[in-house]
Image (spheres, rainbow, N blue to C red):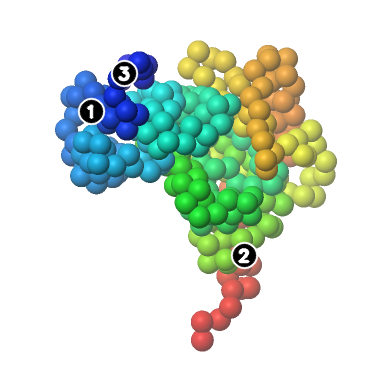
C-alpha cells in the first residue's frame, strides 16, 4: 500500500480532521470497516465510531492504524492533536517510532529491561509506574506500548533479534504472576520465525554495551540507524561512523551470548525458579 502524507491545513477541528483522514485512508484502500477490523484485530464498530468522530480511540489503535496505512507517524500526530495533548510522544521518540514501524530488520541489546515490542501489559505497567507515571497517563502509555507490539506479528513483520543481559531476567516484577506471564511471552515470541531471543550470562564479563540499551533499525533504503536509550531519555544515532562503532560492540555481545536454544533453556529455568518461589494457593 503506497504511503501517504497526512492531510494538513484543513479548517475542521483536530478531532474532525482525524476522523476525516481515517475515512479517507480506508476508502482509498477499498476496504470495508469489517475487513479493516479483521486485519487489525479490533471490533469494526470502534473504527466506525472513530470515523464518525464519536471517539478517537486509544493510542494503541492510532499506532496500529498509522503503521497499517504507512503514515510514518502522521496519523499518530493527528491523533495527538485530537486528544488535545501534543506532548503525548516527544518529537524525537515519534520519529523513532516511525522508523521502527517501517524497518525491515531490527536488532536489540537490553542491559536493564525487555524491549517494549516484547513486553506484556503487566510488565509495561509496572515498569512505567516505577518511572513515575500514574492514572490515565500510565494507562495511555501501556496501551500505546501494547499497540506497537503488533509490529512483530502482522503480515510482513520484520526480522527482530533481542539479546538480553541475564540481569534483565533476574530483575523480577513485584507481581510474580505477571512476571511468569512475561517470561512465558518471551518464550512464545521466540518461537516465531522472524524473532530470535538470546541471553548473555553475567559470567560473560564486561563488554562494549555494558551500560547501554541499544536498538538498530535497518531501513528499506539499506541504511542502519541506532537508538540508544536510558530509563529517562533516548537519542537517535545516524552518523555512519558512530553506528558502525555501536554495531561492532553489538557483534561482540552476540558472540558472547547463548545460542537461541540455550537461551530458551535459560529462560525456562528462570520460569521454573519463579514458579517455585510463588506462594502456595492452598
Tell which residue pokes out farthest to the right in this image: 206
The residue under label 2 is: 174
Residue 124 in view, yes or no? yes
Q: Report the Cα–Cα distance between label 3 and label 2.
A: 48 Å
Q: At 19% from the left edge and 24% from the top edge, which residue is drawn? A: 27
Q: Report the Cα–Cα distance between label 2 and label 1.
A: 43 Å
The residue under label 1 is: 23
Name the mark nearer the viewer: 1 or 3: 3
Question: Horizontal and vertical percent for residue 141?
Answer: 50, 45
Badge 1 crowding class, 10 Å Cα cut-off, few under 14, some 14 to 19, many 20 or more, is: some
Badge 3 crowding class, 10 Å Cα cut-off, few under 14, some 14 to 19, many 20 or more, is: few
Residue 26 in view, yes or no? no
Q: At 51% from the left edge and 82% from the top edge, which residue is drawn? A: 281
Q: Secondary structure at mark 1?
A: helix
**Quarter-of-image position of residue 116:** top right
**Quarter-of-image position of residue 198:** top right
Q: Nearer the viewer, residue 63 or 225?
A: 63
Count numbered badges in the picture.
3
The residue under label 3 is: 10
Is 28 positioned to the left or the right of 280 in the image?
left
Between disc 3 and disc 2, whose residue precedes?
Answer: 3
User: Which of the labelled discs sits on residue 66, or is there none?
Assistant: none
Between disc 1 and disc 3, whose residue precedes?
Answer: 3
Question: Horizontal and vertical percent for residue 223?
Answer: 57, 15
Is 189 positioned to the left or the right of 271 in the image?
left
Q: At 30% from the left edge and 20% from the top edge, which residue is drawn? A: 11
Question: Horizontal and vertical percent for residue 29?
Answer: 22, 23
Amino acid at each position: 500500500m503506497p504511503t501517504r502524507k497526512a492531510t494538513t491545513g484543513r479548517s475542521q477541528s483536530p478531532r474532525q480532521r482525524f476522523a476525516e483522514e481515517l475515512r479517507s485512508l480506508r476508502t482509498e484502500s477499498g476496504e470495508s470497516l469489517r475487513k479493516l477490523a479483521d486485519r487489525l484485530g479490533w471490533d469494526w464498530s470502534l473504527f466506525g465510531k472513530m470515523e464518525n468522530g464519536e471517539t478517537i480511540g486509544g493510542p494503541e489503535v492510532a499506532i496500529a492504524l498509522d503503521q497499517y496505512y504507512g503514515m510514518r507517524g502522521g496519523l499518530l500526530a493527528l491523533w495527538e492533536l485530537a486528544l488535545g495533548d501534543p506532548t503525548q510522544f516527544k518529537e524525537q521518540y515519534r520519529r523513532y517510532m516511525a522508523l521502527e514501524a517501517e524497518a525491515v530488520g531490527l536488532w536489540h541489546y537490553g542491559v536493564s529491561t525487555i524491549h517494549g515490542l516484547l513486553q506484556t501489559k503487566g510488565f509495561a505497567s509496572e515498569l512505567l509506574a516505577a518511572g513515575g507515571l500514574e492514572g490515565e497517563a500510565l494507562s495511555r502509555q501501556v496501551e500505546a506500548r501494547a499497540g506497537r507490539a503488533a509490529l512483530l506479528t502482522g503480515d510482513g513483520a520484520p526480522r527482530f533479534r533481542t539479546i538480553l543481559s541475564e540481569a534483565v531476567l533476574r530483575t523480577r516484577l513485584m507481581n510474580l504472576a505477571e512476571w511468569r506471564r512475561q517470561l512465558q511471552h518471551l518464550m512464545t515470541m521466540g518461537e516465531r520465525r522472524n524473532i530470535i531471543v538470546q541471553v548473555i550470562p553475567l559470567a560473560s564479563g564486561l563488554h562494549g554495551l555494558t551500560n547501554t540499551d541499544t536498538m538498530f533499525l535497518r531501513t528499506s533504503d539499506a541504511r542502519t540507524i541506532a537508538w540508544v536509550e536510558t530509563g529517562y531519555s533516548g537519542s537517535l544515532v545516524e552518523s555512519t561512523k558512530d553506528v558502525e562503532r555501536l554495531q561492532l560492540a553489538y557483534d561482540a555481545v552476540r558472540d558472547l551470548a547463548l545460542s537461541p536454544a540455550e537461551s530458551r533453556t535459560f529462560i525456562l529455568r528462570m520460569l521454573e525458579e519463579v514458579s517455585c518461589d510463588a506462594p502456595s494457593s492452598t
